[in-house]
Image (cartoon, rainbow, N blue to C red):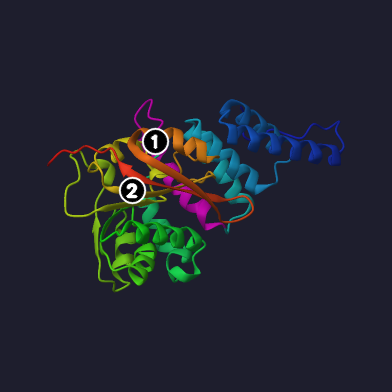
């Protein structure tokens, strides 16, 4: 499918724009339902009819990437960047796609992104430097604190701790011992700079091949599981009967391997590994929500 295309000369401009809008809506719907072939077809039609909308090219590129077409995705993001060159997120995505195109092994369709990508995001995006009190995720974190307080949590391992905003919030509300892991060196530096009574360690959690051991009663995994291919393997390597509180989104993003449109989808994927699972949905905006789920881990029960 050509990335560029051309407007059909016989169609009036307003008809083309209306048709392009309709195609874009169909593309979004198809993408949300997992029909990547239809999403690709409709996004191709949308940008052919109305090639001057930069956000459509970026969304087209995201679907191309999700379908395993990194070369085409790179071209679409480059087009978006040419049309609107001041979007930092697209520039970071372009760098990551260039790296993926150079380094990907034949047949590799992993959507996991590199540590370099997250380093760039954490380094540039101001949202990761603001106080936890100003974060859009504050309602999610408040619910997590309520769950941990009710559980009587005393010690936490945080998988994918990011820049330490959640840690700052937790330690301001609960008397807990805290250890956070993240594979982004930039995230760990930001977390350490907050001056918390906490331990932050740089580690590739997905690379752990032995069960996690240690003296802790609770595992937190907020906005982490959707970023890794082997999310189930990660949970399987955690200690049996540790209390888990995790969250996953209902929306796609460049870094997401998967997302969940409903609580039922969350339950279906994670219930085999989380006993007595409870799933709650917390709205962040009119369209975006976070599913928080909790329960006791089935885990490995093994020793290192």
- Position of the C terminus, as image quadrant, is top left
Looking at the image, is 38 positioned above or below residue 88?
Answer: above
Q: Position of residue 283 (x, y in %)?
A: 57, 54
User: Which residue is at 65% across, 32% downward?
Assistant: 44
Whether residue 29 is visible to the viewer of this picture, yes or no, is yes
Q: Are the residues tagged 1 and 2 within 8 Å (C-beta)?
A: no
Instruction: Kindly report the secondary structure that dominates the magenta region of the rendered protein.
Output: helix
Q: Residue furthest bottom?
A: 195
Q: Position of residue 249 (x, y in %)?
A: 49, 47
Q: Position of residue 262 (x, y in %)?
A: 54, 40
User: Which residue is at 43% across, 64% downward?
Assistant: 128
User: Which residue is at 50% across, 30% downward?
Assistant: 67
**Snapshot quadrant of residue 16:** top right
**Snapshot quadrant of residue 85:** bottom right
Along the viewing direction, whichever of 124 and 75 lies nearer the viewer: 124
The residue that disc 1 covers is 271
Q: Secondary structure at mark 2?
A: strand
- Where does the magenta region start and end? 87-111
Along the viewing direction, whichever of 121 and 171 lies nearer the viewer: 171
The residue that disc 2 covers is 244
């Amino acid at each position: 499918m050509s990335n560029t295309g051309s407007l059909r000369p016989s169609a009036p401009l307003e008809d083309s724009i209306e048709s392009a809008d309709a195609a874009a809506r169909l593309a979004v719907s198809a993408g949300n339902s997992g029909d990547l072939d239809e999403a690709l077809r409709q996004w191709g039609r949308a940008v052919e009819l109305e090639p001057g909308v930069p956000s459509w090219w970026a969304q087209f590129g995201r679907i191309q990437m999700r379908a395993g077409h990194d070369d085409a995705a790179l071209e679409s993001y480059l087009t978006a960047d040419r049309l609107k060159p001041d979007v930092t997120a697209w520039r970071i995505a372009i760098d990551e796609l260039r790296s993926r195109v150079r380094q990907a092994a034949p047949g590799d369709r992993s959507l996991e992104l590199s540590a370099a990508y997250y380093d760039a995001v954490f380094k540039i995006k101001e949202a990761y430097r603001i106080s936890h009190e100003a974060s859009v995720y504050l309602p999610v974190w408040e619910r997590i604190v309520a769950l941990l307080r009710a559980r009587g949590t005393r010690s936490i391992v945080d998988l994918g701790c990011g820049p330490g905003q959640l840690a700052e919030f937790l330690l301001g509300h609960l008397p807990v011992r805290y250890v956070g892991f993240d594979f982004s060196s930039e995230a760990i530096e930001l977390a350490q700079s907050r001056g918390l009574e906490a331990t932050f360690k740089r580690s590739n959690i997905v690379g752990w091949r032995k069960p996690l051991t240690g003296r802790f009663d609770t595992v937190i995994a907020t906005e982490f599981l959707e970023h890794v291919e082997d999310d189930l393997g990660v949970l399987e390597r955690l200690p049996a009967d540790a209390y888990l509180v995790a969250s996953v989104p209902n929306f796609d993003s460049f870094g997401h391997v998967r997302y969940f449109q409903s609580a039922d989808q969350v339950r279906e994927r994670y219930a085999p590994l989380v006993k007595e699972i409870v799933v709650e949905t917390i709205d962040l905006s009119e369209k975006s929500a976070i599913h928080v789920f909790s329960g006791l881990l089935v885990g490995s029960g093994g020793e290192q």
